[in-house]
Amino acid sequence: MESEILEVLPLHNYPEFLKETCDLINDEWPRGETARMMSLQASRDNLPTSFILVKDRKQVLGHCKLTAIPSIPESCFIETVVISKALRGKKLGTYLMRHIENYSKNVLQLKMLHLSTKGQEEFYAKLNYEICAPVSIYGGYLPANSKLRPSSHTIENSVPERTSVATNGAPPPPPLPPTNETAWNNNNNNIKTSKTYMFKYL
Ligand SMILES: CC(C)(COP(=O)(O)OP(=O)(O)OC[C@H]1O[C@@H](n2cnc3c(N)ncnc32)[C@H](O)[C@@H]1OP(=O)(O)O)[C@@H](O)C(=O)NCCC(=O)NCCS
């Protein structure tokens, strides 16, 4: 009987999978190949780190990226989580996320993880992520009415940032309850107007 070997590998150690990973991500979020490749080639052990889910060391099935949040050193941002379109609904996303959580806890010694999403809240909720206040890639939680924006790095493959400002190393407050803008609601068909930020203690 044939068995498949699934592995989660740091992309920078397997450059032979760069192009396939680029195509997989661009199939979901189209972007110029040069820019996408440059972003993937930035992967390194010390963050940002791109991870690929690979079958039998032959086929890339998924990707996600961990990015530092400088003013919340005990956390990281998970970005660009994607499973190949044909293979969704087979728990591969769960497998990838669990691996990244273990890596974040045991190798990076992190205490929590953050992410933002628009539309995949239920997937993350099933992995025990909870809604929290918006967080900037520079760290800190953001005032809901802030008009300021970060000046450089933006979170990839997210909807446009509406409220962003760094808080200069202030410790993160406890997560806030969902607001009308960030909550998703399984009981009605509200149109989501902004991203939902979520976090999880590891
Ligand atoms: C989101 C994504 C990574 C999930 O991967 P996946 O392999 O299909 O997910 P899994 O099979 O592990 O699903 C785990 C559980 O979440 C549920 N789930 C997954 N996606 C869901 C969605 N969009 N809405 C509701 N539930 C969802 C599954 O039904 C499953 O539930 P169960 O445990 O009760 O059976 C994948 O759908 C994807 O690549 N989407 C497009 C890219 C994207 O939007 N990424 C997220 C960016 S924030």
Image (spheres, grey):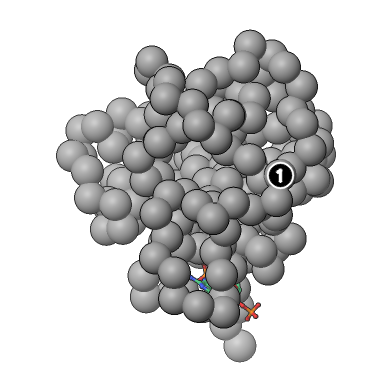
Whether residue 74 sits left or right of residue 36 in the image: it is right
- Residue depicted at 24% across the width and 32% down the height: 35
Q: Nearer the viewer, residue 139 or 83?
A: 139
Q: Position of residue 98 (x, y in %)?
A: 70, 57
The image shows a total of numbered marks equal to 1
Q: Position of residue 25 (x, y in %)?
A: 34, 52
Q: Position of residue 29 (x, y in %)?
A: 29, 52
Q: Nearer the viewer, residue 156 or 170?
A: 170
Q: Position of residue 142 (x, y in %)?
A: 58, 29
- Residue depicted at 56% across the width and 70% down the height: 185
From the Cβ of disc 1, is ligand 1 less than 8 Å away? no
Whether residue 150 sits left or right of residue 74 in the image: it is left
Q: Nearer the viewer, residue 17 or 143?
A: 143
User: Residue lying farthest top?
Assistant: 168
Asked whether residue 149 is in view, the answer is yes
Write down the quadrant of residue 143 in the picture: top right
Query: Which three-letter amino acid code belongs to the residue tagged 1?
Result: Leu
- Residue depicted at 69% across the width and 14% down the height: 169
Write down the quadrant of residue 183 in the picture: bottom right
Classify mark 1: helix, strand or loop: loop
- Residue depicted at 36% across the width and 70% down the height: 85
Q: Is 169 located above or below residue 116 in the figure? A: above
Which quadrant holds the N terminus?
bottom right
Q: Are there few (<14), some (14-19), or many (20+) residues within 10 Å of tag 1? A: few
Which residue position is annotated with label 1?
176
Q: Nearer the viewer, residue 33 or 12?
A: 33
Asked whether residue 8 is in view, the answer is no
Whether residue 121 sits left or right of residue 31 in the image: it is right
Q: Is 151 located above or below residue 108 in the figure? A: above
